[in-house]
Amino acid sequence: MPNTRQAEKRMRRDAKRRLRNRYHLSRMRTYIKKFRKLIESGQLEEAQKFLPEVISIIYHTASKGVIHKNEASRRASRVSKLLNKALAKAQGQAG
C-alpha cells in the first residue's frame, strides 16, 4: 500500500496507463494474428489490402509510447517480409 498521497496518485495513474497500454498492445497483436491467418489460409489479396492497416496500427502503438519506434519498425518490416515471401512462393507455383 502507498504511504504518501503522491504514491497513491502515482498508483492510480499507473493503473490507468497500464490499462491503456494493454489495450493498444492487445489490439496490435490481434491485427498481426489476423494478418498471419490470412497469409496461412492463402488469402493473399486480402492480406495485401490488410497490410497498410496492420502497419498503421503498429506505428500508432509506438506513437502512444507502448512500444519503441524501432520495435514498431521491426514488426512492420517482418509483416511486410512475410507477405512478400508468401507472394513470391505463390508466384513461383503459378509460373
Image (cartoon, grey):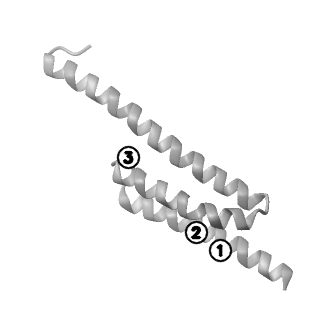
Residue 58: x and y, percent? 47, 56
Q: The residue under label 1 is which amino acid type?
A: Asn
Image coordinates for residue 79, horizontal then vertical, percent: 58, 64
User: What residue is rendered at 65% in x and 69% in y?
Assistant: 83
Q: Is residue 35 above or below residue 22?
A: below
- Real-space CA distance between mark 3 and mark 1, rounded to the nearest whole angstrom: 27 Å
Label 2: which residue? 80
Q: What amino acid is labelled 2 in the image? A: Ser
Q: Label 2, label 3: how many angstroms apart (C-alpha)?
A: 21 Å
- Name which quarter of the figure residue 44 lies in: bottom right
Front in this rendered view, residue 57 or 62: 57
**Is residue 23 positioned above or below 3 on the image?**
below
Q: CA distance from mark 1 to mark 2?
A: 6 Å
Quarter of the figure that contains the N terminus: top left
- In the picture, measured across the screen, residue 72 lies left or right of residue 53, that is left
Residue at 63%, 50% (x, y): give it: 33
Numbered mark located on residue 26 in the image: none
Residue 44 sits above or below residue 8 on the image: below
Q: Secondary structure at mark 3?
A: loop
Q: Residues within 10 Å of mark 1 (few under 14, many from 20)?
A: some
* Residue named by callout 1: 84
Which label was assigned to residue 66?
A: 3
